Amino acid sequence: MQAEAIDISFKTELLSLYQQMYLIREFEERSGEMYTRGHIRGFLHLYSGQEAIAVGAISTLEDRDYVVTHYRDHGHALARGMDPKHAMAELFGKATGSSKGKGGSMHLFQASRNFYGGHAIVAGHLPLAAGLALAARYKNTGGVALVFLGDGSVNEGEFHETMNLAAVWNLPLVFLLENNLYGMGTAVGRAHARGGDFDMAGAPYGIACAVVDGMDVLAVREVARAAIEKTRAGNGPAYIEAKTFRFRGHSLADPVNYRSHEEEMEWRKKDPISLLGDRLLQQDLTTELELLEIRETQDDVVREAIRFAEESPEPTEDELFTDIYA
Amino acid sequence: MATKTVIEAVRDAMHEEMSRDQNVLIMGEDIAERGGVFLATDGFIDDFGSARVIDTPLAESSIVGIALGAAVNGLRPIAEIEFADFVWPAMNQIVGEASKVRYGTAGKKYAPMVVRMPYGGGVRGGLYHSQSIDVVFAHQPGLQVVAPATPYDAKGLLKSAIRSNDPVIFLEHKRTYRLVRGEVPDQEYTLPIGVADVKREGSDLTVVAYGLMVHYCLEAANMVAESDGIDAEIVDLRTLSPLDRETILKSVRKTSKALVVQEDSLSYGIGAEVAASIATGAFEDLDAPVARLAGPDLPEMPFSPALEAEYMLSPEKIAAAIRDLAAY
Ligand SMILES: Cc1ncc(C[n+]2csc(CCOP(=O)(O)OP(=O)(O)O)c2C)c(N)n1
Ligand SMILES: [Mg+2]
């Protein structure tokens, strides 16, 4: 009886991971279309392919924890519970967006979910994450900060400064590096002293390191859970490298002429969404029909988000002059 | 003469200088294999090789700092910052270090280097791909700050910047890159840093601008000439520091009225420096207070296209300011 109950809640959890990853993929691919059609302007960086990382890691957090991320941030925002309508409206630059259209795609932000953005400057958000962790400990909230970073961040000074400080001060902070093998057009091996081996990037600072298959949401979840628990217990910061791939270009303006189609196809075989779906089917935890229903529901959610964004008003002129000082 | 875009002129200037002088090299993010995000160095890796066309990791502070070290040791590096918005990690190397080398060593060492960066808005870039960072560098003595508006000026000034024996911050307005075309001579030429240029002669009032705003001002001048018969003179600063006060004053002494236009936010801007220079140098000639038209005093350019349009100046907004000043 009890075993069955556990199974059911476990199954619900797994299906929720599937649903979240699919939501993100659908959100990304449809917003890509909106960009191509000129409804979304500027720069758009899609998270397709990396969904397992945000979903797996954020699923282990509590409400009191903090999430900070880079500019490829739609997936993290949705995984943290941002309403897709508000996220999409922000991409459109509409008044109903999560930052009233002022921030745009790279700057999703939701204080009520302790979601601290969306940061365009590579590695610029790392000290901020450490500051959130410092404040959490000072206020004794028991909260921890989880910060996502791209492989390019490792080459910036802030990465090393923050790692060192976090270790010296024993901060409740988890660094989650999303190694998608490229920073814009630069393959990691061309920019990094250890040829793109980031597995031990925390080691020089005495920070515990772990590596995980970033296409496997369950593996990410396990590794993230262990790191979060460790840091929450006061054992200092943790570092995780998740190996992954962005299925799309750096942004939608990227001709992607620096990597091969074959490489992309190899990685697409490891699509995190079908990987989880197949595993659930194999273990008889779900049916094709149930997965289809999940996908269709999420398709509707995204369709609704787009409709909401399209129909929302532009911010009015006076919004230009709000939110400058308290 | 050939017709070129601004980005082509920038590319040609660097290509010519690299062909001319073995000591010129260029480094930046994705500039070699990919030729730069705006393709300013497209094909350079094939022509000059990887010792002179250097892809760097994401590390702005080091890109500039290493360029400085190489410059002090006899090379003429060009450091590319992908977008001006990403230059802040390198502030210490530029303002804190490069600007001070010659003075601090009593002239024994100097830093012949150029830091190029695309800046400015109107490209839907939002908070971190639209910034005007001009005034921060212009405030720092020891740096030269160049901000051309046309292909002709961009090429001639960039060649001079590369040959200069002191650090140059070379600001390229990214909206002009492919939008603005112009005649560029086939034969070799350079233009002196620190000399402004009258882009349109006029008798009623002087409009001072730089970068993208020069083009907006020229459009505005045509609009008010047609609608109101106002004859505006447009002075393109071209170099923000050192400022060519003589050319500005000469124009204002002729027209007796001045408007300074800048895309950057108003307070403590280039316009303030120009206005103060006019007030000091041409007070007796003025028929009206010096007017300034600038971006609003906001922390950053908002993403929303609707708000961006509000934020940015336009030929229409400039024409209105010209009419106001003319009516004074
Ligand atoms: C300080 C800074 N320099 C340069 C850039 C331009 N830029 C934006 S993303 C990017 C590549 C980052 O790669 P990575 O960290 O691997 O993240 P990914 O795009 O792969 O998710 C670059 C060079 C920037 N945003 N900030
Ligand atoms: Mg990357």
Image (cartoon, helix red, strand yellow):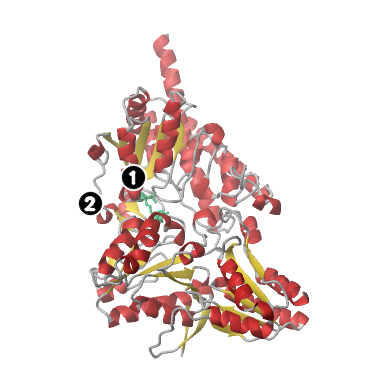
The structure residue drawn at horizontal position 47% and vertical position 78%, both measured from the top left corner, is: B194
Q: Chain of mark 2?
A: A
| Percent coordinates x, y for residue A234 in the rendering | 34, 24
**Sequence-wise, which precedes: disc 2 or disc 1?**
1
**C-alpha gap between disc 2 and disc 1:** 14 Å
Residue on which the image places disc 1: A159
Going by the image, does B212 lie left or right of B325?
left
Mark 1: which secondary structure? helix
Q: Depth check: A178 or A259 in front?
A: A178
Is residue B185 visible in the rendered structure shown here? yes
- The residue under label 2 is A193
Query: Can you give x and y, in whole percent of width and height, for residue A86 in the image?
Result: 59, 41
Residue under the point 37% across and 29% down? A172
Q: Sort mark 1 into few (<14), some (14-19) or many (20+) by Cα contacts within 10 Å.
A: many
- Identify the secondary structure beneath mark 2: loop
Q: Is residue B59 above or below residue B243?
A: above
A171 vs A303, left or right, is left
Instruction: Give the camera-side residue of B139 and A190.
Output: B139
The residue lying toward the viewer, choosing from B215 and B256, is: B256
Residue B111: % across, % down:
31, 70
Q: In this rendering, do the residues under marks 2 and 1 share a single chain?
A: yes
Disc 1: which chain? A
Q: Amino acid at mark 1?
A: Phe
- The amino acid type found where label 2 is placed reads Ala
Q: Nearer the viewer, residue B131 or B125?
A: B131
The residue at the far top in this view is A1
Residue drawn 46% across and 39% down? A76
Rendering coords of residue B162 (x, y %): 35, 76
Q: Quadrant of residue B205?
A: bottom right
- Indicate left or right for A319 with A46 as reference: right
Is the CB of the residue bearing disc 2 within 8 angstroms of ligand 1?
Answer: no
